[in-house]
Amino acid sequence: MSSETLAGARLHDAADPLRELARQFVLPEGPGGAPLVYLCGHSLGPLPRAARAIVAEELEDWGRLAVLGHDGARRPWIPYHEQLRSGLERLAGARPGEVVAMNSLTVNLHLMLASFYRPAGRRTRILIEAGAFPSDRHAVASQIAWHGLDPRSELIELAPEPGNGLIAPSAIEETLRARGDEIALVLWPGVQYLTGQAFDLAAIARSARRAGCVVGFDLAHAIGNVPLELHESDADFAVWCSYKYLNAGPGAVGGCFVHERHGAAPGPPRLAGWWGHDPATRFQMGPEFRAARGADGWQVSNPPILSSAPLIASLAIFQDAGIDRLRVKSVALTGFLERLLEPLPVTLLTPRAPAARGAQLSIRIGGSPERGRRIVHALRSRDVLCDWREPDILRVAPAPLYNRFEDVAHFAERLAQALSAMP
């Protein structure tokens, strides 16, 4: 790395108003004890330091109170999910009552599809992107089959443009204009997991609405990454996990948005469970289901306390930082990384326009998959942790909560070294 590049990175870090946030996270260390250059927030965010104390308190209350903790814990367990609501509403751009923390992403997706995918007459198909995250595709294909239909004919997978791997927004609009009367539901990512391409969700929702389609979003790679306005976008539903940019830990509780127009009882048909019952009468244990208002009415089970607790710590950090300020830093970090990649023999797959990407840049490495895997191993031996996807893509996510410009500079230097060592 040139001294000029390193000096420039350190100047950026010194001027960063969010630079102290990194101290609130535990970053993994390499074999020598030095912190890794950790660029995997798109897969698993690091541990918020405050999460340890919160989880420990829940364990203490469990031991001290047992069943009485449902009402008497420091954070009572029955309404535990309510502690997460306001922070998630802010990050999702939702109105009160439109968001609930529950289950995991794919479970929530199945619950939403059970309510909102209602094939009838000619309108039976689901539109997704080609190369969708496999769990999304498995979910929608199985839901189509559940209705006695054939996923091979009923699933429309919109392919990217030849050569660049990206999906033009105009192609989504054109597909809905041409085939909208066949499409019952559109499921689209906020940020595509492989390419890092971010989408204008409001524009997609408008196109879907004009075509008469229900529209839902998978925000696994978007929430906590880019600002969202789910209510104003007019989405019917959205789902997400919280272990990526939300830093809530492996297997952490997922989340769900349901637009308020669907939240009044009785609302759409659903797969019901007792925790979705109106809390005023839930413990009367009656046989009839009476849905709680809003997104809460889609709950099926008690909140998972130990997998929800770390999210309390993370959401507090987001509240202090502000998603808009984080977005400003994110754009600067990816822009800095893009400039450092320009002289290297790699291809940037992610869009260059900041509005069309989040914190992730996907980098196509030339040569064989074996060469790419060796480059990844070389990076790890140099204390750099990023993500490899076959056959030739590095996914790199400098997250503004805890990554520095100096991290980006070190990654680019060590990537250049690995590439030159493996021509």
Image: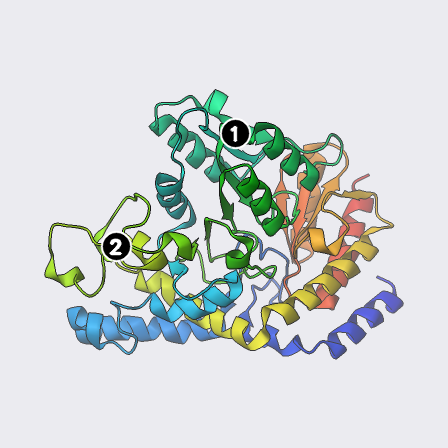
Dot 1, crowdedness within 10 Å: few (<14), some or many (≥20)? some
Mark 2 and mark 1 residues within 8 Å of each other at the beta carbon:
no
The residue under the point 40% across, 37% down is: 117
Task: Give the percent coordinates (x, y) of residue 300.
Answer: 27, 52
- The color scheme shown is rainbow
- Secondary structure of the residue carrying numbered label 2: loop
Closer to the N terminus: mark 2 or mark 1? 1
* 88 versus 141 height, above or below: below
The residue under the point 38% across, 26% down is: 145
Q: Quadrant of the N terminus?
A: bottom right
Compared across the picture, whether 371 is left or right of 399 comes to right
Compared across the picture, whether 249 is left or right of 383 comes to left
> Is any part of residue 411 visible from this angle?
yes
Of residues 152 and 241, the one nearer the viewer is 152
* 409 versus 167 height, above or below: below
The residue under the point 62% across, 48% down is: 203
Q: How many marks?
A: 2
Q: CA distance from mark 2 to mark 1?
A: 31 Å
**Which picture quadrant has residue 372?**
top right
**Residue bearing the label numbered 1:** 181
- Secondary structure of the residue carrying numbered label 1: helix
The disc placed on residue 291 is: 2
Question: Which amino acid type is shown beneath numbered disc 2?
Answer: Ala
**Which picture quadrant has residue 310?**
bottom left
Dot 2, crowdedness within 10 Å: few (<14), some or many (≥20)? many
Q: Quadrant of the C terminus?
A: top right
Question: Which amino acid type is shown beneath numbered disc 1?
Answer: Asp
Say which of marks 2 and 1 sits in front.
1
**Which picture quadrant has residue 358?**
bottom right
